[in-house]
Image: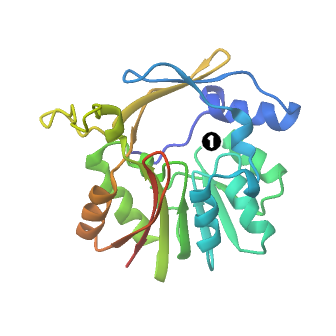
Amino acid sequence: MTNAILSPNNDPMGTAIRDYHQQGKAARLRVLSSMFEEDEMPVAHLFRTLDKMPPLEQRALGMAQGRVLDVGAGAGCHALALQEQGMEVKAIDISPLSCEVMKKRGIKDVECVNLFDQQLQGKYDTLLLLMNGTGIAGKLSGLPKLLNRLKELLEEGGQILIDSSDLKYIYENEDGSMDIDLNAPYYGEVDYQIVYKNIKGEPFDWLYTDPMLLASVGKQCGLKCQIIEQGEHYDYLAKLTL
């Protein structure tokens, strides 16, 4: 985890977002990993409206209150939905291309800044980290740093709304037993690489956490964790408070 932002010349997702905004369509946005088969992210999904969002995201947006910071806002679908409801929301992302699109889509407060950059200051009533918000931690060892940074930005009485998925289902046998090597790194640590057209992004680490682990690390950081809702695919929405 660094304070860096992406170069516009090496930003596959940001380029896909720009293409879709300009042309109403985009080429394949490929997701590579050493752990899984190649996947594809539908770029249109990044522009979804509130009624097209999964139930957990709808629930999170319904719980947002006060001054909101949307972390890793992408094409701005969550920030835009909140702004349309009359809420004060600041959207941040490390992609300059994505930030330009968000501004053109009408989001009033957009900043291209890394969450861990100390130039990002202020206090927020709601910190919103959706589409597997724990991923920003990279690895399990980075989760305390992520939660402590969010804590710095949290207004007294505020809330962190963050979602993730428990990947244990990948290792589950038909009889319910698990093929998880307890001596290996945490099973929720995944490596990814995003490819769009001829742009191959830098590989990066992404963290999925199970609910008990998030609650445990949150407690170590002085945060109380409440699981708000569980999804149908081992995903969940959590609320962290001081």
Residue 203, by quadrant, is: top left
Colour scheme in use: rainbow
Q: Tell me which residue sits at (32%, 43%) in the image.
A: 139
Asked which secondary structure carries label 1, the reply is: loop
User: In terms of image quadrants, where is residue 108?
Assistant: bottom right
Residue 191: x and y, percent?
39, 30
The image position of residue 47, as x and y in percent, is: 75, 45
Q: Tell whether 112 sits left or right of 238.
A: right
Q: Could you tell me which residue is drawn at 74 percent across and 47 percent down?
A: 48
Residue 65 rendering spot, x and y as whole percentages: 62, 78
Q: Would you say 111 lies left or right of 115 here? A: right
Q: Is residue 18 visible?
A: yes
Instruction: Check the image and name the residue furthest to the right.
Output: 23
* Nearer the observer, 15 or 219: 219
Residue 109 appearing in the image: no
Q: Residue at 37% x, 79% y: name it.
A: 242
Relative side of 117 to 6, left or right: left
Which residue position holds label 1?
95
Residue drawn at 86 percent across, 35 percent down: 22
Q: Residue furthest top?
A: 198
Q: Is residue 17 above or below residue 142?
A: above
Q: Amino acid at mark 1?
A: Ser
- Above or below 98: residue 184: above
Which image quarter is the N terminus in? top left
